[in-house]
Amino acid sequence: MGKMGGFTSMTPKFKSKAFSKTRGLITLLNDEILHPPAPSAFFCEMKDRLFRALVAASQFIKGWRVPVVLLRGPDRAAGREVTLLVAGQRHWTHYFIHRFFAHEPAVVRTRKVVVWRLRALLDAWQHEAEMTLVAIDRVSSRLFLKPAWLGIPVWVGSSMLVPADWKSLSSRESRIAGDLRRVRNTGFESEVSRAAEDFELFYEKFYLPTVRVRHGENPFVVSKGVLRAVFRQGMILWCKSDGEKLAADLVLLREPGKMAIISNGIIDGNEDWLRKGVLSSLYVFSVELAWELGCTSIFMGGSRPSLHDGVFRYKKKWSDALYRHGGLVSGQYDIRLRWKHLPGPVADFLSHTSLIHHDQDGFSALWFFPRDLPLTAESLARQHKDLTAAGLRRFRILLPGPPPPGFVCPPHVQLIPLADAARLQAHELAEWEPGGVIGAEAA
């Protein structure tokens, strides 16, 4: 076990005397993890592929009977009575259900159906719902659903290239300078551990409570065995104050030069510590650790697939790319979405819950400009700057009226009047490229 001092300088060097005690650990990590013998690396890769294949097969078998539920209640945007059709695992769709309805909806009808009959049931019930969500494993989705759905990842991963120093990172994103000042003022310290008892503490007192607080009654909890296997190839990065452990990252060194934050947690799930800067501190400490280990990139884990998600919004100021978050279980799933009519409740839903969706080999975003904001060039530019994220292939913005004169449209942005897209399905809108005539496609 070794200690690292808190943030002390604007250079990629550890200045704390406490960190000198961890040199032996860092050498061990570099020797055992960053530079493993070739046969061992090959064996580990084959073992990982086999394990993932077994997990995929288990999820396919587990999901052969699919729960389908029709939900009704007032929508979050305007309080209108709306209906949502949902199929599959609730913990994958709970975020969107919560964002669509103003409060817990009533169950109109529910049924379980074998997966090869799911498509027929959805087609029979879809006319009753404004929108349909399906969360089944990717194998079943390819086999039993039509391609005419918008594909949404369960989680979107954010990553960053490790900067040369703090100055270069702060110049790219001005808000990071504020985080650095905050970390310096808190006096938090970091500590790296590979002790088995620290993993037990992390899982029981940090990870589990945090997941339950963040994700409510339908959390997806990674088993202790899976995270223990990760820990054996990585470490715990603690954030401490006066010797008390307050928050932590579970860190994995995936291959030479690449560091991944697999999960994190706050003591007892107490989010008051977020406001005191423990999360900002962990980001700073992870960059410092990457410098010491010679890593060139950090994979910061997954967020909900929406530009409006709070975790995603925080990560985007650090990240410079997006990637498919390949969790052992969550990576086997995608969410499929389609709607009955775009104008009305669905468009209003998109105004406060933009969607990050699959687009070829990357991600694009879909958002409806809120009706209660003035549709001017200045307002549109301000909203775009607030929402956009590095790594998006396209950012399609639906507008309640014609594009405002004077707006300078960035190359990756597409402005689409809602009236022109009214008859398009979700996947048709997401496949449209610049130069396409939406009205002609819909005719």
Image (tube, rainbow, N blue to C red):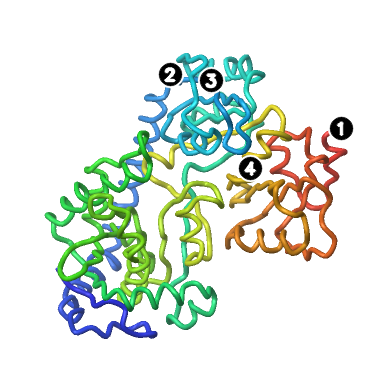
Q: Which disc number belongs to residue 70?
A: 3
Query: What residue does disc 2 label?
Result: 65
Query: What residue does disc 1 label?
Result: 443
Q: Amino acid at mark 1?
A: Ala
Q: CA distance from mark 1 to mark 2?
A: 38 Å
Q: CA distance from mark 4 to mark 1?
A: 24 Å
Q: Are marks 1 and 2 in contact (CB under 8 Å)?
A: no
Question: Few, some or many C-alpha atoms within 10 Å of disc 4 (few <14, some 14-19, many ≥20)?
Answer: many
Which of the two labelled residues, at mark 3 and mark 1, occupies the earlier sequence position?
3
Which of the two labelled residues, at mark 3 and mark 2, occupies the earlier sequence position?
2
User: Vertically, is 93 above or below 290?
Assistant: above
Residue sitting nearer the eye, 222 or 297: 222
Q: CA distance from mark 3 to mark 1?
A: 31 Å
Q: Nearer the viewer, mark 4 or mark 1?
A: 4
The local secondary structure at tag 4 comes to helix
Q: Amino acid at mark 4?
A: Leu
The local secondary structure at tag 3 comes to strand
| Residue shown at the point (61%, 26%) measured from the top left | 82
| Residue shown at the point (63%, 47%) measured from the top left | 359
Q: Quadrant of the C terminus?
A: top right
From the viewer's perspective, tell me whether residue 380 is left or right of residue 420: left
Question: Few, some or many C-alpha atoms within 10 Å of disc 3 (few <14, some 14-19, many ≥20)?
Answer: many
Question: Few, some or many C-alpha atoms within 10 Å of disc 2 (few <14, some 14-19, many ≥20)?
Answer: some
User: Vertically, is 128 above or below 219?
Assistant: above
Query: What residue does disc 4 label?
Result: 350
Q: CA distance from mark 4 to mark 2?
A: 30 Å
Q: Are marks 4 and 1 in contact (CB under 8 Å)?
A: no
Find residue 92 and report its horizontal and vertical position in percent.
45, 36
Q: Nearer the viewer, mark 4 or mark 2?
A: 4
Which of the two labelled residues, at mark 4 and mark 1, occupies the earlier sequence position?
4
